[in-house]
Image (tube, rainbow, N blue to C red):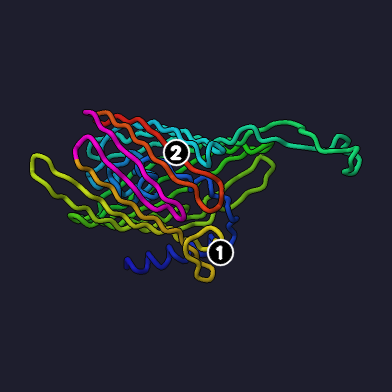
């Protein structure tokens, strides 16, 4: 019976992707979470992140996530794209997550000819017509439920308001996540935009978001004395797309492409975590500092071969 449900779900995803618009859901791919970025863009099995609900809503039912609030600021591509985030994980036995993501690109200059009615010439050159900005505000919710002693499932609905140049619209969708975690080994999966999310524009047009599948496996190592334990976490993630992203993805196989991510975290003492990773085509690194219930996270992603520049993220969080 379970196999039948899986086959039906896969068929629905394939049907939905037939009318999907490429890049329509890119705003949903810009991930929250500083620790996740520092570990190479991994997080489907990372219960230490306060952005766990975005990465895999099933983590909220694992019993390992903390309650807390998190404020993040990020500059992507050396400041071209700015990201502000506020997130919280609440609830005692049944936890849920709320995240607000704000993405902005400012001071975009539009040009037109000095005399728009005439053709381009030395006497009729382009000039700056006006300056505009692009803004996206995205609200994510997430909740998880246990399926068994080692397994859980979760769902994460999302709603976005888009203001691009002189156009605006709304987007909505949902992700569904799964987690298996037993002792030191964890496996996570997240089917993003599983029913083909929609982007509706004010002029009546709409776009379908192409679903994609996230898979991740991780392993944790504890060593040292009981009074001063040390921890190492290793994670490998692959995000699989049902379209040709040969110029962007790590792997291409016909109509299927995939992005590869890997992360490593070492916590030598309770107050410090050191992280590093590989994010598709760039090296990442970061630090987490803890003092009682307060935490400070920093992540850096080096320049990638596309020439768009580096990315930096910093966040302040409080847990209880």
**Closest to the observer: 202 or 270?**
270
Magenta-colored span: 269-292
Q: Quadrant of residue 285?
A: top left
Query: Who's the residue at 47% across and 41% down the image?
Result: 311
Give percent across and percent down for residue 214.
Answer: 40, 57
Q: Residues within 10 Å of mark 2 (few under 14, many from 20)?
A: many
Cβ atoms at labels 2 and 1 below 8 Å apart: no
- Residue picked out by circle 2: 312
Q: Tell me if I can see residue 56 in this picture.
A: no
Position of residue 223 in the picture relative to residue 211 (left or right): left
Query: Who's the residue at 30% across and 37% down the image?
Result: 288
- Residue picked out by circle 1: 244
Position of residue 113 in the picture relative to residue 188 (left or right): right
**Closest to the observer: 13 or 71?**
71
Mark 1 residue element:
loop
**Closest to the observer: 163 or 294?**
294
* In magenta segment, residue 287: yes
């Amino acid at each position: 019976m379970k196999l039948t449900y899986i086959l039906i779900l896969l068929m629905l995803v394939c049907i939905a992707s037939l009318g999907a618009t490429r890049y329509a859901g890119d705003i949903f791919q810009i991930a929250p979470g500083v620790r996740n970025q520092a570990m190479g863009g991994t997080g489907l099995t990372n219960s230490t992140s306060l952005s766990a609900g975005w990465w895999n809503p099933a983590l909220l039912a694992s019993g390992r996530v903390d309650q807390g609030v998190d404020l993040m600021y990020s500059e992507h591509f050396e400041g071209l794209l700015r990201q502000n985030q506020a997130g919280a994980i609440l609830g005692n036995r049944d936890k849920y997550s709320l995240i607000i993501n704000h993405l902005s690109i400012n001071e975009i200059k539009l040009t037109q000819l000095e005399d728009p009615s005439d053709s381009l010439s030395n006497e009729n050159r382009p000039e700056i017509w006006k300056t505009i900005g692009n803004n996206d505000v995205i609200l994510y919710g997430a909740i998880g439920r246990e399926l068994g002693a080692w397994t859980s499932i979760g769902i994460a609905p999302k709603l976005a308001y888009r203001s691009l140049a002189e156009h605006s619209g709304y987007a909505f969708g949902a992700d569904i996540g799964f987690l298996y975690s037993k002792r030191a080994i964890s496996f996570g999966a997240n089917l993003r935009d599983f029913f083909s999310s929609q982007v509706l524009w004010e002029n009546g047009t709409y776009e379908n978001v192409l679903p994609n599948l996230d898979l991740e496996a991780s392993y944790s190592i504890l060593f040292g004395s009981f009074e001063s334990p040390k921890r190492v976490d290793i994670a490998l993630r692959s995000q699989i797309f049902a379209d040709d992203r040969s110029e962007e993805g790590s792997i291409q196989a016909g109509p299927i492409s995939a992005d590869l991510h890997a992360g490593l975290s070492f916590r030598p003492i309770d107050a410090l975590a050191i992280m590093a990773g590989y994010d598709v085509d760039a090296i990442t690194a970061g630090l987490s500092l803890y003092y009682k219930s307060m935490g400070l996270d920093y992540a850096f992603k080096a320049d990638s071969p596309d020439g768009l520049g580096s990315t930096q993220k910093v966040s302040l969080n409080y847990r209880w």
